[in-house]
């Protein structure tokens, strides 16, 4: 009887059912689209940060350079009077230096053990971010003595044979890491394209893995050598970013102990990558690391996401602010419409409900009847909303808007060195930019949210309408008939 009466009432009130269902459908569709786009933005941010962070990395530990700290400053090249190679009036000089990346600060590597001892830390890895700068120059050979008189002919020599000079400064990023750490850190966020990766047996060896883009620009290949701090390293492998929209963390990866020795930063690191045992432990791990290392800067992936700039950042802000509030407002309006139409329908059905109570229907039966009608209206709206929402997601994925993203970080500075040298004396870390194709994923959670909202809207309207109907008395129906 319940189902029969329910079907008859819904069929007899098609207009009300349609209005409630449409309002609910539009609201739910908007929530689905905003939720999917929000997930897409988060995935895009994760893609941008992946090269900086490393797969499976939840927290990074670094140290902000103190005022006057020059450990990550520009390169300085000193040449003595006897340095260089002289030939035919020209002196050729070359010098290579390996220093901490400008804008970074190094700290004691014992911090790695401190971090590893924190509860719920499942893995930790330390790296040393460096910049290899090579200075090459040719200038005319000078002899000691008095300067040429005014108007006198300058001495011959130099690369142009007329006393001129020529200089070139080439720079690329180098990342020292423990070859035994394969699960945490930047090297875990790349894809091997040729050769092999670093292994535990490479500790102390002069071997390197190169970013494939940098290797191509520098005409380097697996099996060849690359000069770092004046020392030849055998290239054992080439890697590329796991995503085509991201950049790798450095141009070259070498064993951490070798990097520390060549740079003169023995026992120093610049970053520690931390993996928590569970996503629910991240806040606790971050807090305890901050207490154990008060001078360190401890950031989670959520913290670093705020550093992503470009149109991706604008899209993120739009989704978080306008999208969220707009969804809530429209959803609240849809619920209000459902409640008002249900209550209005109950008021118009005074005679009907009064008569039903007069023939023996209990208050609970009437409440269930009204709630059932509203629930079905909500489910119809939910089904339509899911269809509209999925259509909207399909449109977003077909349009595939391209967003620009940038990060200013150690990794960005390294990526910025691909394909060209830096200015004399070093340069500030540049922002690594990339184009990200925004995709809105469809997840089970989105569908469940839609179903839950449709049920909630129907039950809310039904509960209020049913409560209103249950307060009607048979006498009111008799007065209405009279």
Image: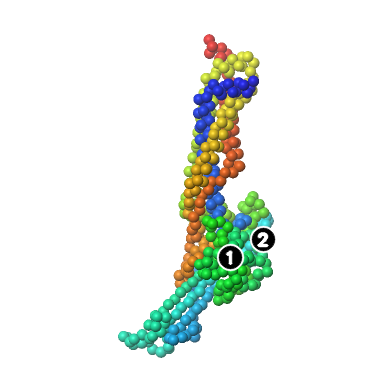
Q: Residue at x 54, y 62 (%)?
A: 411
Residue 138 occupies quadrant: bottom left
Q: Does the image show residue 11? A: yes
Q: Specify the farthest residue to the bottom.
A: 145
Res. 238 mark: 1
Q: Position of residue 354 (x, y in %)?
A: 58, 16
Q: Position of residue 124 (x, y in %)?
A: 65, 60
Tell which of 203 and 117 is nearer to you. 203
Residue 222 in the figure: left or right of residue 433 = right
Res. 260 mark: none
Residue 229 occupies quadrant: bottom right
Q: Position of residue 306 (x, y in %)?
A: 52, 53
- SS at circle 1: strand
The local crowd at label 1, few if under 14, some if 14 to 19, many if 20 or more residues have their Cα within 10 Å, is: many
Q: Position of residue 275 (x, y in %)?
A: 64, 57
Q: Residue at x 47, y 73 (%)?
A: 169
- What distance separates the C-alpha of mark 1 from that of mark 2? 30 Å
Res. 116 mark: 2
Q: Does the image show residue 250? A: no
Vertical placement of residue 200 versus 323, above or below:
below
The local crowd at label 2, few if under 14, some if 14 to 19, many if 20 or more residues have their Cα within 10 Å, is: some
- SS at circle 2: helix
| Location of the N terminus (image quadrant) | top right
Q: Residue at x 60, y 66 (%)?
A: 237
């Amino acid at each position: 009887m319940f189902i029969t009466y329910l079907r008859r009432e819904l069929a007899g009130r098609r207009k009300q059912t349609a209005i409630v269902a449409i309002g609910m459908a539009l609201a739910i569709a908007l929530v689905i689209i905003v939720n999917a786009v929000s997930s897409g933005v988060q995935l895009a941010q994760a893609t941008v940060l992946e090269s900086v962070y490393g797969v499976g990395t939840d927290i990074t530990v670094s140290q902000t350079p103190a005022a006057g700290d020059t450990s990550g400053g520009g390169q300085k090249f000193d040449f003595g009077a006897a340095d260089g190679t002289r030939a035919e009036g020209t002196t050729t000089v070359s010098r290579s230096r390996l220093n901490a990346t400008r804008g970074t600060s190094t700290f004691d590597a014992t911090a790695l053990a401190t971090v590893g001892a924190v509860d719920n830390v499942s893995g930790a890895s330390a790296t040393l971010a460096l910049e290899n700068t090579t200075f090459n120059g040719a200038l005319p050979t000078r002899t000691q003595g008095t300067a040429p008189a005014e108007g006198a002919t300058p001495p011959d020599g130099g690369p142009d044979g007329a006393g001129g000079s020529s200089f070139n400064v080439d720079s690329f990023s180098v990342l020292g890491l423990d070859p035994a750490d394969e699960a945490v850190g930047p090297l875990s966020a790349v894809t091997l394209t040729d050769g092999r990766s670093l292994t535990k047996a490479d500790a102390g060896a002069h071997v390197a893995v190169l970013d494939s883009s940098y290797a191509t620009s520098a005409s380097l290949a697996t099996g060849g050598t690359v000069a770092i701090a004046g020392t030849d390293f055998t290239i054992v492998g080439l890697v590329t970013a796991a995503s085509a929209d991201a950049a790798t963390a450095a141009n070259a990866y070498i064993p951490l102990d070798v990097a520390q020795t060549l740079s003169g930063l023995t026992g120093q690191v610049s970053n520690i990558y931390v993996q928590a045992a569970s996503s629910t432990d991240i806040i606790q791990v971050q807090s305890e690391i901050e207490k154990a290392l008060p001078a360190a800067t401890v950031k989670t992936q959520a913290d670093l996401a705020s550093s992503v700039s470009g149109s991706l950042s604008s899209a993120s802000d739009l989704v978080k602010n306008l999208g969220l509030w707009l969804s809530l407002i429209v959803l609240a309006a849809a619920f209000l419409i459902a409640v008002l139409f249900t209550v209005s329908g109950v008021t118009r059905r005074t005679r009907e409900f009064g008569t039903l109570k007069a023939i023996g229907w209990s208050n609970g039966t009437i409440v269930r009847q009204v709630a059932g009608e509203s629930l079905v209206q909500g489910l119809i709206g939910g089904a339509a909303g899911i269809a509209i929402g999925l259509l909207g997601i399909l449109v977003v994925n077909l349009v595939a808007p391209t967003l620009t993203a940038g990060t200013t970080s150690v990794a960005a500075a390294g990526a910025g060195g691909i394909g060209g040298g830096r200015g004399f004396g070093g340069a500030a870390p540049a922002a690594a930019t990339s184009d990200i194709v925004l995709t809105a994923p469809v997840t089970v959670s989105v569908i469940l949210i839609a179903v839950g909202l449709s049920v909630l809207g129907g039950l809310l309207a039904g509960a209020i309408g049913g409560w209103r109907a249950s307060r009607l008395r048979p006498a009111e129906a008799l007065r209405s008939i009279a």
